[in-house]
Amino acid sequence: MSVLAVLVRRELSLAWTRGGGALLAVGFFVAAAVMLPLALGPAPERLAAVSGGVTWVVLSLASLLSLDRMFERDFDDGALDLLALGPLPLEIVAAVKCLAQWTVSGAPLAIAAPVVAVGLGGPVALAPMILVVAGLGGLSFAFLGGTGAALALASHRGGLLIALVVLPLLTPPVIFGGAAIANFGSGLPWSAALCLLAAYAFACVALTPFSMAGACRNAQS
Amino acid sequence: MITALRVEDLALQRGERVLFRRLSLRIAAGEAVALTGSNGAGKTSLLRAVAGFIRPVVGRIAFEGAAGDLPGEDARRAGCHLVGHQDGLKPGRKARDELLFQARWHGGTAAGALAAAERLGLTRLLGLEVRVLSAGQRRRLALARLIASPRPLWLLDEPLAPLDAAGRILLGAVMAEHLAGGGLILAAVHDPLPLDARQVGIAG
């Protein structure tokens, strides 16, 4: 088994057990979405009008959960030193951690998102677009969240700090994803927004591992 | 393959405080050095500097290979084990999973990891979660990767501290074997190492 496969297995297993894994994020997502009709009132047409956008915002918040332990556990117990002395650079380690976070939390959220949107009264035709947007957006959330988690390493219990650092960076994918969903629903051209969302997500995947590795090295020194 | 470690005119600083200055040290293959010094003198910092985590303010750390100095990054990634106060083990995972990961990550094999566990008397414990192990058992588990994935330079921070008498004798034998095979050991200690080692004192 290659070293990369060994690392991926470990990170998936750790991500699964970190703060409840997929169940926690999906549970929070569904619970927050259920609150919405209670606050807005039961008028179906009002709920249906906002279902797509609201699903998307709540999903972006749900994906912030369980980020704070991404690097912190390895930092606290010394495993980060061990990872730094391994054969693969810290940049790869950081990227694998984020991909594991996406697999365990982002992908289940993306699968739950169309269900939640339709549950709120959104059109069923919107479901495929929400799935794609949530999957792509979730990728950028995981990598940006990892950056926040790595930056907050030295400050213990930096959960809220991570949210504050990361939220502004989440605005572009939220805007692009929201536009893709809204335009798709109203029959307007949607491919530009989706392309921008994909570009942002892939830029995050390509660039943030460097800042995560730098932040880890800074915390280790 | 590292054949010698050279520390030249090194000074380390933590925050505003200079830990030590003008430390020079050479460890050749087959040699063990015991770093001594009071608490806070900078033993751990020196080990972390050799491992590449702390940048020296002055001086340099070089790894000699068969054909001249090796690039530091490569030498550390392929030739260096660091066992510190924190053992890098996840409390919630099985001892076996953690050992296999640590061994493979450092270039060892599963068979080697199980043999190392046998050698250190861990076989019975492999099915348990790390959280239920005692401090000494956890340290043995962390030390198992030294045997499981052979690397020339061992940086050990208080390796004896949580070990019982039998464990210390066992570690002495393992270290002697490593030296006989051309390995290098740099260990920060308060108690004497259970084998012949050159003493180097660090004074602030």
Image: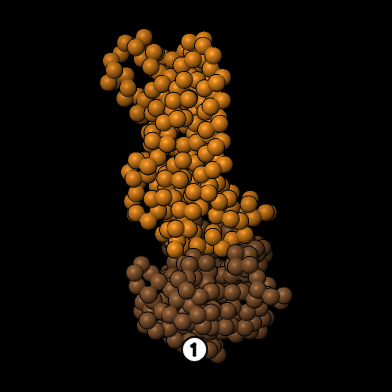
Chain colours: A orange, B brown
Q: Is residue B39 above or below residue A24?
A: below
* Secondary element at tag 1: strand
Could you tell me which residue is drawn at 55 percent across and 30 percent down?
Answer: A198
Residue B16 coordinates in the image, percent (x, y): 34, 69
Please give the chain letter of the residue carrying mark 1. Answer: B
Q: Is residue A196 above or below residue B192?
A: above
Neighbour tally class for label 1: few under 14, some 14-19, many 20 plus, Cα within 10 Å: some
Residue A161 coordinates in the image, percent (x, y): 34, 45
Residue B60 coordinates in the image, percent (x, y): 53, 74
**In the visual, does B154 lie left or right of A160?**
right
**In the visual, does A152 lie left or right of B54?**
left
- Observer-nearest of B142 and A55: A55
Q: Amino acid at mark 1?
A: Gln
The answer to whether one can see residue A127 in this image is no
Q: Quadrant of residue A34?
A: top left
Could you tell me which residue is drawn at 46 percent across and 79 percent down?
Answer: B188
Could you tell me which residue is drawn at 48 percent across and 10 percent down?
Answer: A186
Q: Is residue B115 above or below residue A29?
A: below
- Observer-nearest of B74 and B84: B74
Could you tell me which residue is drawn at 60 percent across and 68 percent down?
Answer: B72
- Observer-nearest of A198 and B111: A198
Residue at label 1?
B199
Q: Quadrant of residue B15?
A: bottom left
